[in-house]
Image: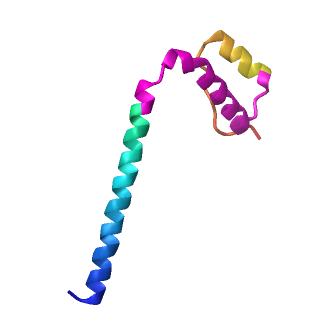
């Protein structure tokens, strides 16, 4: 095996180890999401999603609160009107 082949082999080995670590982390995250009490987190998630939405779209908080209280789905346009 040449020096270049050895280096390539070590690089591939590092890639595999990194992918295995990523897979383990993703698996742990999946288990955590499956085990959380979704009813308990519903309001909290809804709050953070509305805050994220306000940052991205820029709607006034009052409109978002009204939409949340009405519990009706609302079409969201990613582009702002010019």
Judged from this view, the residue extending furthest toward the left is 1
Magenta stretch in the rendered image: 32-61
Is residue 23 found left or right of 50 in the rendered image?
left
Count of number-bearing discs? 0
Residue 52 makes an appearance in the image: yes
Query: Where residue 54 appears, x then y in whole percent?
Result: 72, 32
**Quarter assignment of residue 33:** top left
Is residue 51 found left or right of 72 in the rendered image?
right
Label the magenta part by its dominant secondary structure: helix
* Placement of the N terminus among the 4 image quadrants: bottom left
* Placement of the C terminus among the 4 image quadrants: top right
Q: Residue at x 38, y 60 (%)?
A: 18
Colouring convention used in this rendered image of the protein? rainbow
Q: Nearer the viewer, residue 40 or 61?
A: 40
Tell me if residue 3 comes above or below residue 28 in the rendering. below
Query: Where residue 28 appears, x then y in whole percent?
Result: 40, 39
Tell me if residue 60 comes above or below residue 65 in the rendering. below
Q: Residue at x 49, y 19 (%)?
A: 38
Tell me if residue 62 comes above or below residue 78 in the rendering. above
Query: Where residue 6 appears, x then y in whole percent?
Result: 27, 82
Query: Where residue 20 appears, x then y in whole percent?
Result: 33, 54
Judged from this view, the residue extending furthest toward the top is 70
**Quarter assignment of residue 5:** bottom left
Q: Nearer the viewer, residue 77 or 9?
A: 9
Taking the magenta stretch, the answer to whether it contains residue 72 is no
**Quarter assignment of residue 40:** top right
Q: Residue at x 66, y 10 (%)?
A: 70
Taking the magenta stretch, the answer to whether it contains residue 48 is yes
Residue 80 makes an appearance in the image: no
């Amino acid at each position: 095996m040449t020096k270049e082949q050895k280096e390539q082999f070590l690089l591939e080995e590092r890639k595999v180890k990194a992918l295995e670590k990523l897979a383990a982390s993703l698996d742990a995250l999946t288990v955590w999401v499956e085990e959380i009490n979704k009813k308990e987190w519903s309001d909290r998630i809804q709050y953070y999603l509305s805050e994220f939405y306000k940052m991205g779209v820029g709607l006034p908080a009052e409109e978002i609160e009204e939409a949340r209280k009405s519990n009706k789905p609302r079409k969201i346009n990613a582009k702002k009107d010019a």
